[in-house]
Amino acid sequence: METIRGFKRTHMCGTLRGENVGQEVSVCGWVQRRRDLGGLIFVTVRDRSGIIQATFNEETNSELFVKAASLRSEYVVAVRGILRARGEGAINRDMPTGEVEIEACELRILGEAETPPFEIVDDTKTGEELRLKYRYLDLRRPSLQKNIFIRHEVARVTRDYFYENGFTEIETPMMMKSTPEGARDYIVPSRVHPGKFYALPQSPQIYKQLLMLSGFDRYIQLARCFRDEDLRADRQPEFTQIDLEMSFVDVDDILEMIEGYIHRLYKEVMNIDLPVPLPRLTYADAMNRYGSDKPDTRFDMEICDISDVVKGCGFSVFTSAIEAGGSVRGIVAKNAAKTLTRKEIDKLTEMVRGIGAKGLAYIRWVDEKPACSFAKFMTEDELRAIAERLGCERGDVALIVADRDKVTLPVLGALRNTVAKQLGIIPDGYNFLWITEFPFFEQDDETGEWVAMHHPFTMPLEECLDYLESDPGRVRAKAYDLVVNGVELCSGSIRISDYKLQAKMFEALGLTKEEIEAKFGFLVDAYRFGAPPHGGVGIGLDRLTMIMCGADSLRDVIAFPKVQNASELMSECPSYVDDKQLEELHIKVDTDK
């Protein structure tokens, strides 16, 4: 193998253009492709910036030609030569450097390569499992590299923006006390303290609140977080959170700060000028209109309540739901009658049954008279009134669910998204939306107990404080989520800064003094020494990048991701450790279990 010593790279492959013609250029990279046309060899060299073609002519330099003939895919090379304009018939309009090529006068082979297990191209047909096993090869693909560079730009703009707005970057511990955060902790055994464990942070929540009590006023961190939960396309066991906290603020101050950040980010990275301020919906409005606290507002198909229209009808499915305190609601898919055939509606019925609904009623209006699954229980006037309330016309399909609101709304929300994808009516673009005034409590169906919907440090709305004990279901929180295209991007709240109110909140959640002391003692103590009003958010950097890249999975924007079972295929972790390590940690493993 040859060395790079004495070879000075002058250009990145993908940066060469017509204005460089006539210059002596030197590039380094990997061999993407070699084409041998007899007395002429074309070699495409690739680096992180793109590709450039180099030519080797047997008549001009036979020794160099022979050397070029030995090149194989993924060899690492350095090439020097004069940049020439390609002939008119040889221009490749599909590549940015397609009008020029390097007429090579020097070639160094810096590293040979075995034939890779798959071709390093964007339109690969290779399965993801094999590509993740050889992730270092997969990361050579231009599309993945582009995603990683966009992620880098997101991080750069993030720091620039928040630094300019007076935030201080502070690192918080990676090994901390286990506190209830909503998911399972990853725990770390202590050798020095036998039988005791650290927890990896699910978020820096408690520490960033303590930083506000410490007087830092504005904190920012690109924090690594860990949650031991089941994976999906937009979830990983370890992730990066743009974590921030601000003192002496209320909800509007934080939302305006984040809107400025999102506007700056999309302008600098995507060259998209997002309109601000961003629209807002309360949680109650979002659920009633879209059946979701993270609605995709790029398309209509809003939920319509028809309970009052069908209250006295002869269809017991509707009337019994209303009598039980529930509702009857529906959505209308415009011009969908040809696509949503009876067979397709049957599939949708099975889908909604799988997520909690008892069934799905429908009106499918193809001909002069609509087909209705419950027509025999209704008069023509009642059917007409339902269609009018829903806005269902000829060519449309109405889908109706009757149940408790906590079933009806989310089922129709899921149905709305499924039907929109099926009809192909979701346009491109980015629809941002704030969801505000979340319920403070949610009731456990099995135990009937009230639990915090967010974390227990969230401040209730002042007008709801009187309901903490008498009517917990009416308490709304100073909590907010930022949603884009149906994906939750960030979540935050104003925190409780009055330690007496915090103690009252713990009591409302059913925590004993012993539990409060064990789980949050140091935080409760800190609040006794003067806490400023403060609040913040955590923004998923990985998820934000995924949306900006138009990627389907977080794995496409993380260099070395985990798969569904939380393992990394390349390094084969998690793995066993030897008995000596376990002995030092005072741990015994029952391998039978």
Image (tube, rainbow, N blue to C red):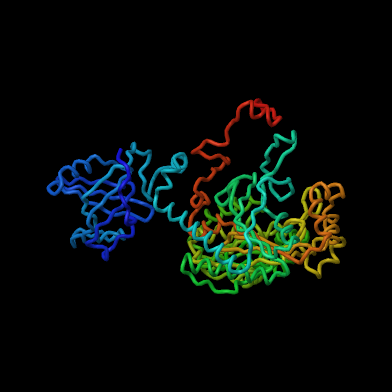
The residue that appears at 49% across and 69% down in the rendered structure is 267
Viewer-side residue, 374 vs 296: 296
Residue 86 versus residue 275 in the image, above or below: above
Image coords of residue 300 (percent x, y): 56, 68
Dividing the picture into quadrants, the one containing residue 470 is bottom right
Question: Which residue is farthest front?
Answer: 6
Q: Nearer the viewer, residue 192 or 5?
A: 5
Q: Position of residue 447 (x, y in %)?
A: 81, 48
Residue 553's spot in the image, x, y percent?
A: 51, 51
Pick the residue in front: 213 or 537.
213
Quadrant showing the C terminus: top right
Left/right of residue 209 with respect to residue 260 in the rendered view: right
Query: Disc count in the image?
Result: 0
Residue sitting at x 72%, y 66%: 247
31 displayed left or right of 361: left
Q: Is residue 306 visible?
A: no
11 or 261, nearer to the observer: 11
Whether residue 516 is visible, yes or no, is yes
Residue 330 percent location from the top left of the image: 63, 64
Quarter-wise, where is residue 456 in the image?
Answer: bottom right
- Name the residue located 54 percent from the left edge and 43 percent from the top edge: 562
Q: In what quadrant of the picture does the N terminus appear?
A: top left
Above or below, 410 against 566 in this view is below
Seen from this angle, which residue lies furthest left? 59
